[in-house]
Each structure stands twice: as C-alpha cells, then as structure tokens.
Amino acid sequence: MRLMINHQTHYQYTDQARNSIQYIKMTPTTNVHQQVHSWNVSVPGEKQVKTDAFHNVWITSSQRQPHSQMTIMAQGMVDMNPNTQFGIDIAVNPKLFLQPTPSTMCNAEMKSFAECYVPRLNRANLMLLSEAILNYIPYVPDRTSVQTSAIDAFQCRQGVCQDHSHVFIAMCKHLGLPARYVSGYLFVPNTSHLASHAWAEVFFENSWYCFDTSNQLFVPNSHIYVAIGRDYWDVAPVRGIRERGGIESMNSIVQVLAC
C-alpha cells in the first residue's frame, strides 16, 4: 500500500527571533515494514543530517537571520506492508529499553495496576493491560502536554497517544519487559487529516510487539515508523532553542493519504 504523507509545522513569534537551532526527527527509513520512495524535509537555514543512537535520522537546522515565523515541511511517499505482524528490529540491545526515564517512571498505584492485569507475562494479559489503561485514561486532547509524565497522566486520568504510550511503557518496565516509544503516522481509510501518532512496543519472546493503546491496535500494519526511543524526548519531531522571539505559537497539519 502506497501512502503520501504531508506534515507541516508552523511557528510564529511575537518578537523577532534569531540564532535558532532546530533538531528534527521527521524522516522515515526503509526497513522490512516499509519502503521510502521519496522524502524531503524542508526547513530554513543551514541543515546537517546525522543518525542518533537509535538509528533515527536526525536533522539539525540553524537559522542565524532574524525571523518572526518558521515553517518545517516533511513530505513524501512510503510503501507500507499491510501484513506486518511484528515491530521492526533495530541494531540496539533490547535491554536498553529497560532503562528508566523521567517520563516513564511508575508510582506504587501504577505498579499495582500493572500487576493486577498481568499476573503472568503473556501477550494476552498485556493486551488486557493496554485496554485497561485506555479505560482508565480516556483519550482527551489538550489536557496534557509533552511535559506530562506517565505518573502525571495516570493521576490526571485523561490524555492522548503520548500519555497512553508512556504509561504502558512504564508499567511494562516495572514488569521487567523492555518497552520502547515509537513515533510515526497512522493510516485510517477514508480519513485524510490525522495528527502524527505514537505507540508502544514490547520485546517479548524474541520479537517486538505493537501496543497502540489509543486505538487498541496490536499489529503495526496501519503504522509508518519514523523514530524509536525510550520515550517522547528521544523521538520528538521538533525540538529547538533560540534567542529572543517572545511568545511562540505552533500549528501542525498532517495528511496521510492512500495513492
């Protein structure tokens, strides 16, 4: 299945900004699950392309001139394998994804929650845990932010795909299972406007299994992989710093269309 993706992020500043540096992870790579036919990330200023420790494509863009707005546009075409059953393998030891991060810590209540739904380590129980998390934390946009940790989301009892992924990852790590955060895009037929997406994957029985808690999907055959990490901060599509600029506002538009 060939998909066309258009991802635009627009920034506006109330004052002139200068000397801004943006770290961009918006580039999918070809693997057993997907083949990238074309892809381009358009961003102002000087651009350098590298890969990070998780083999994600990492673009650094520097803009020295004063500016009051900035647009980052990523677009291209990707063939997706709809028969995929497992998450992709990367040349990273799965044990790295047992490492705790500030966004994926568990409190005592979360530990008890996980142990209640997973008395034995098997995929069926992990799926029950994923369903229970969605019931406990309904999908409600604009109530959390990128700063919200798994503990915060669990206490708030509202959140989005980022929060569901962080909570699920935190609980799986508590259960002794390597769990990773994946950013990308989700294709839903007959729907053209979708936000960029995130889901969790767990290393179990020598394979990576998909746990898309927000959508209750457990195979990644509707997903396009962009970046993999321990939590949101490892895979954030855009992070940056700047001098001045006043108050920043951001608007993002994503289209995922079948060709």
Image (spheres, grey):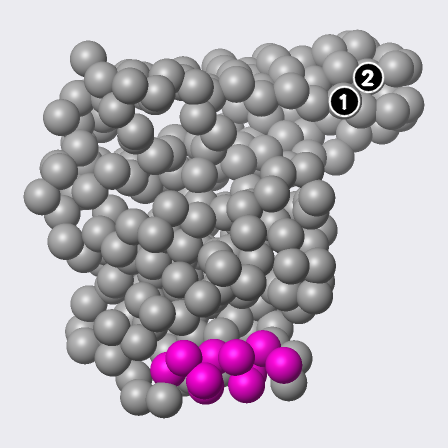
User: Hey, which residue is sitting farthest left in the picture?
Assistant: 83
Task: Answer left or right for 97 relative to 138.
Answer: left
Above or below 220: residue 93: below
Q: Position of residue 56 (x, y in %)?
A: 39, 45
Residue 138's x, y, as percent?
Answer: 55, 52
Residue drawn at x 13%, y 26% is 1
> What residue did someone put label 1 on?
249
Residue 86: % across, % down: 18, 56
Q: Which residues are magenta?
A: 109-118
Residue 137 versus residue 237 in the image, above or below: below
Q: Is residue 11 left or right of residue 202?
A: right
Residue at image position (64%, 59%) is: 157
State which quadrant residue 51 falls in. top left
Question: In the picture provided, is 14 more to the left or to the right than 166?
Answer: right
**Three-letter code for the amino acid on which mark 1 is drawn:** Ser
Which residue sits at x=13%, y=38%? 82
Hey, which residue is sitting farthest bottom in the picture? 119
Provide residue 185's location: percent of width, then percent of height.
Answer: 37, 34
Is there a contact, CB below 8 Å, between mark 2 and mark 1?
Answer: yes
**Label 2, label 1: how many angstroms apart (C-alpha)?**
7 Å
The dot on residue 13 is 2
Q: Quadrant of the C terminus?
A: top left
Q: Secondary structure at mark 1?
A: strand
Amino acid carrying mark 2 in the image = Tyr
